[in-house]
Amino acid sequence: MISLKHGRFSARAVGADEVIARLLIPVNANITAGGIQYNNLFYECDPEIASGVRVFGRTTCEARIDDNCVDYIYVRFDKNSIFKKHYLLKKRDVFKGKAHLDTDVMADWVDTQKEINLFTLDSLSNINNKDEFNRKGNERLNEIYESRRVHGKDIKKNRKNELDSLGRTHVANGRSEPLLPSSSNVLLLPGREEKQRWLKGKKKTEDAE
């Protein structure tokens, strides 16, 4: 307040946040239990204020935004208080550094995708069809595995029959063993005693000559 008549004036000091906030675009924000909400963005909030919202419900407050950056918002909770800077919550870091217009476009795209992929009875039916398809696929895999197992048994059996026909192997208890010749066809080599007797006889023959 300035008085020219008495040559007096009065003023109050304000911070940088207050000055910057009054130069930005005025908007309305909501105070929720999850933070200060503006559109699809959430900003940090004093825990005491957030707890009050849980009791009395959501309330609105005056805010200022910078169109070119969503990283922060200036908020005051009543007309007698000053604007304070509040930063974007970590759960919305995906929007960090972007302009408000870009975040609006992204939010619209997400909403559109939700409408396109809306969960309905048809989508539930598709899930059931998928489960049925997986079940049939597993049954088919089991059939293929069983046929391969039986085919492998046939190969072993045919190989055994072929070797038996050639007289090369004798299968007992499922294990292949070499076929041994009969005892009549085995030529026994002389032992040590036989060798000694043969040497003595040979020596006597030589002495007689």
Image: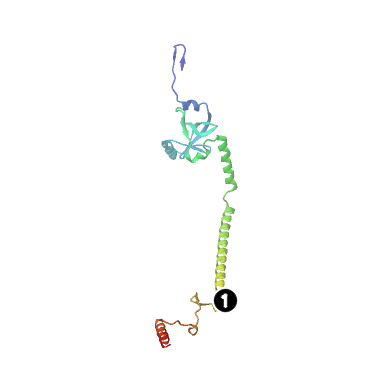
Residue 164 image position (x, y, % from top left): 55, 78
**Displayed quadrant of residue 192:** bottom left
Closest to the observer, 40 or 196: 196
**Displayed quadrant of residue 199:** bottom left
Residue 159 image position (x, y, % from top left): 56, 74
**Displayed quadrant of residue 12:** top left
Give above or below for 110 relative to 25.
Answer: below
Callout 1 amino acid: Glu
Give above or below for 11 relative to 26.
Answer: above
Q: Residue at x 47, y 33 (%)?
A: 86
Count of all numbered marks drawn on residues in the image:
1
Give above or below for 92 relative to 7.
Answer: below
Mark 1 surroundings within 10 Å by alpha-carbon count, few (fewer than 14), some (14 through 19), many (20 or more): few
Closest to the observer, 2 or 107: 107
For the C terminus, give its image quadrant. Answer: bottom left
Give above or below for 102 relative to 191.
Answer: above
- Pointer 1: what residue? 162
Residue 175 image position (x, y, % from top left): 49, 74
Residue 58 visible in the shown view: no
Q: Secondary structure at mark 1?
A: helix
Which residue lies most toward the front here? 209
Residue 118 image position (x, y, % from top left): 58, 48
What's the colour scheme? Answer: rainbow
Closest to the observer, 146 or 107: 146
Which residue lies most toward the bottom here? 208
Q: Residue at x 57, y 76 (%)?
A: 162
Q: Residue at x 58, y 45 (%)?
A: 113
Which residue lies most toward the top here? 5
Residue 28 visible in the shown view: yes
